[in-house]
Amino acid sequence: MVKRKIIIPFGLTLIFLVLSALAALGICAEEKQVRKVTLDPYLGQRFYESTKLIPDQERSSPLATYRKPELYKLYPQAKKISLPPADFNGISLEETIKKRRSKRQDDVFSDKPVSLKELSQLLFSASGITGSNRGLELRASPSAGALYPIEIYLMANNVLGLDEGVYHYSVSGHNLELLKAGDFRDRIAHAVMNQPGVKESAVVFIFSAIPGRTTSKYDLRGWRYVYMEVGYVSENIYLEATSLGLSTTAMSAFYDDELNNLLDLNGKDEMALHVQILGRKNE
Ligand SMILES: Cc1cc2nc3c(=O)[nH]c(=O)nc-3n(C[C@H](O)[C@H](O)[C@H](O)COP(=O)(O)O)c2cc1C
């Protein structure tokens, strides 16, 4: 009688320990629980209605009174890497538009690196300062009110003359600021839902937004502009990459918080909006 009392709990404990060990080894993994969340199906429509301009109506929210964030984001403590001048003259715009294509299979990129000169050209074409008007610096991509809410970060995986790591593009200095050194391929691949081509790419661009730059002037309607503007910046990279003979693909399917964490963005004042992978063609 006494013996049975001891043996049964011991047997159960043994089974539990074996199953836990197998689960830890991934052999008998428990089925992952997916939390189901129901969203407001009219959220998009409400956003559209709330951001309409209507004659004879002054629509405002406290957003417009917020302090306007700086126009140029800088990481003063970061190591700076200067970029060579962007002076490439490529194929005609018409030819570029005709040739532009998204490529994202696993074998689309060669393992040959992208040069720092090419990276410089791409960044300049996306957001470089190309002119001025009444003391206001103007950039390669258009921006509502010239407020430029889009920031560009990049992960250098295979760039000649650039250590692997996460960088921020400083528009005002046309240089790179090193934020994190090291190989972040696995992290970015997971964040971008292991889409094909991410791990093999030479560069992963991450476009973020600082919406306050635009909403401080345009209030809630500014959110519309922010989402449009990331498209302009991304398209310029598409076109420049095509002109340089490189391969690229935009990617918007990603786990937002994983990208924000990687870039140390709080997801409120600044958040990742779009990703673009790029590399040399596998020819
Ligand atoms: C906003 C946006 C998001 C996109 N997201 C993805 C993505 O997550 N994964 C992907 O493989 N392609 C993505 N693409 C690329 C499109 O699939 C591609 O542009 C489309 O198939 C048309 O092909 P083309 O770019 O070669 O003309 C995205 C494109 C845009 C504009």
Image (tube, rainbow, N blue to C red):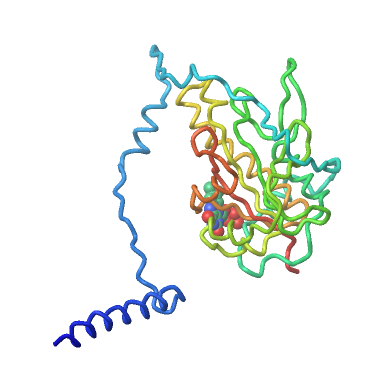
On the image, the x and y values in percent for residue 16 come to 32, 77
Q: Quadrant of ligand 1?
A: bottom right
Front-most of residues 120 and 32 = 32
On the image, the x and y values in percent for residue 149 come to 59, 31
On the image, the x and y values in percent for residue 197 come to 62, 63
Front-most of residues 66 and 223 = 66
Which quadrant is home to the C terminus?
Answer: bottom right
Quick one: which residue is furthest to the top in this view? 56
Q: Which residue is rendered at x = 31% and y = 45% of the image?
A: 39
Q: Which residue is rendered at x = 72% and y = 20% of the image?
A: 136
On the image, the x and y values in percent for residue 174 come to 78, 36
Q: Is residue 247 left or right of residue 35?
A: right
- Tag count: 0
Q: Is residue 245 left or right of residue 24?
A: right
Front-most of residues 277 and 89 = 277
Q: Which residue is rendered at x = 79% and y = 45% of the image?
A: 120
Q: Which residue is rendered at x = 33% and y = 62% of the image?
A: 33
Quick one: which residue is furthest to the left in this view? 1
Q: Is residue 244 left or right of residue 276?
A: right
Answer above or below: position of 150 versus 243.
Answer: above
Q: Is residue 143 left or right of residue 32?
A: right
Answer above or below: position of 202 versus 206.
Answer: below
Which quadrant is home to the N terminus?
Answer: bottom left
Answer above or below: position of 183 versus 80.
Answer: below
Which quadrant would residue 55 be assigned to in this image? top left
